[in-house]
Image (cartoon, grey):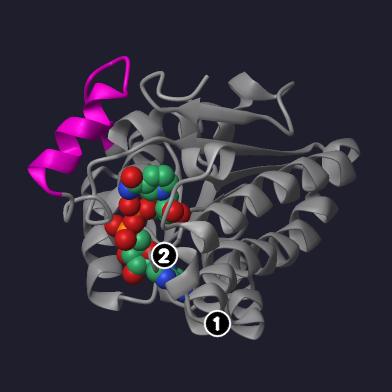
Amino acid sequence: MAIQDRIALVTGAGQGIGRAIALKLAESGGDVVVVDINMEKANETVKAVESLGRRGLALKHDISDTRSAEEMIEESVGKMGGLHILVNNAGIVRDTLLLRMQEDDWDAVLNVNLKGTFNCTRAAVKYMSKQRYGRIVNIASIVGEMGNPGQANYAASKAGVIGFTKTVAREFAARNITCNAVAPGFIETSMTEGLSDKVRKELSSHIPMKRLGSPEDVAESVLFLASDTSSYITGQVLSVNGGMYM
Ligand code: NAD
């Protein structure tokens, strides 16, 4: 098994891509801490993890709250007995064109997507450094690589995640901690389910593979970067986008 008996924490794993990542890691031999602000959904994911024969733990934390993120790592190490893999997946959108974008739209997205990634990573590397092992995978986005009208806040947050990833990779490589990003294209989740058929068709026409991706497409790449198969890969952005951006 790719990550046999490793302990992983996935933020925003109550649904969508995070849930698919949690299940893929469990299927591959890992125990999984499922963090979400929605405890009902987190509990559902934990049930699915347990039905795969692995330990699961649901924790309610808001990753944008620095103290809460620190407690999340303490609690998860305390209850699970360690932490090997951190997947910074939780993210939100507040889309609108720049001239209509309110300060609040900017702050909310940056606080969860970028500051949340900083909060969880800083708390986790304190622990990972001591054990001289860690795998960190940050979920960025194609939008952070190429921009997208209506998503100035989101694009900036995800471009920030990419810069942050490369810096963490450089700072902690000597401690045997790798840090990489996965940049999904357009994926079938609640984030994209509101798209009209017209927009969906238009989008697909720009994707060489002519379809949106699935959460499982993303989860497979996360598993690779979370495993020891990728031990000489750090500071990279792995694009999972059907060829939409090369
Ligand atoms: P989603 O909205 O389906 O799920 C996000 C989960 O994160 C939810 O369960 C939510 O409750 C949780 N969450 C939100 N804010 C949180 C917070 N402050 N603290 C803890 N948990 C919080 O989203 P998704 O489509 O599965 O996206 C997951 C990640 O993938 C995000 O970072 C997103 O930006 C990124 N992404 C998604 C797509 C896509 O097309 N869906 C494309 C590129 C990147």
Please check the rendered image and state whether residue 209 is part of the magenta-colored stretch, yes or no.
yes
Mark 2 — residue? 92
- Residue sitting at x 75%, y 42%: 133
Task: Characterize the local packing of mark 1: few (<14), some (14-19) or many (20 or more) Cα atoms within 10 angstroms.
Answer: few
Q: Nearer the viewer, residue 76 or 17?
A: 17
Q: Residue at x 39, y 69 (%)?
A: 94
Q: Position of residue 137 (x, y in %)?
A: 59, 43
The quadrant of the picture showing ligand 1 is: bottom left
Q: In the image, what residue type sits under mark 2? A: Ile
Label at residue 103 = 1
Determine if residue 1 is in view.
no
For this rendering, which residue is in front, 104 or 3?
A: 104
Residue range in magenta is 196-214
| Residue 218 against residue 12 in the figure, above or below | above
- Whether pointer 2 and pointer 1 mark residues with C-beta atoms closer than 8 Å, the reply is no
Whether 26 is drawn above or below 236: the answer is below
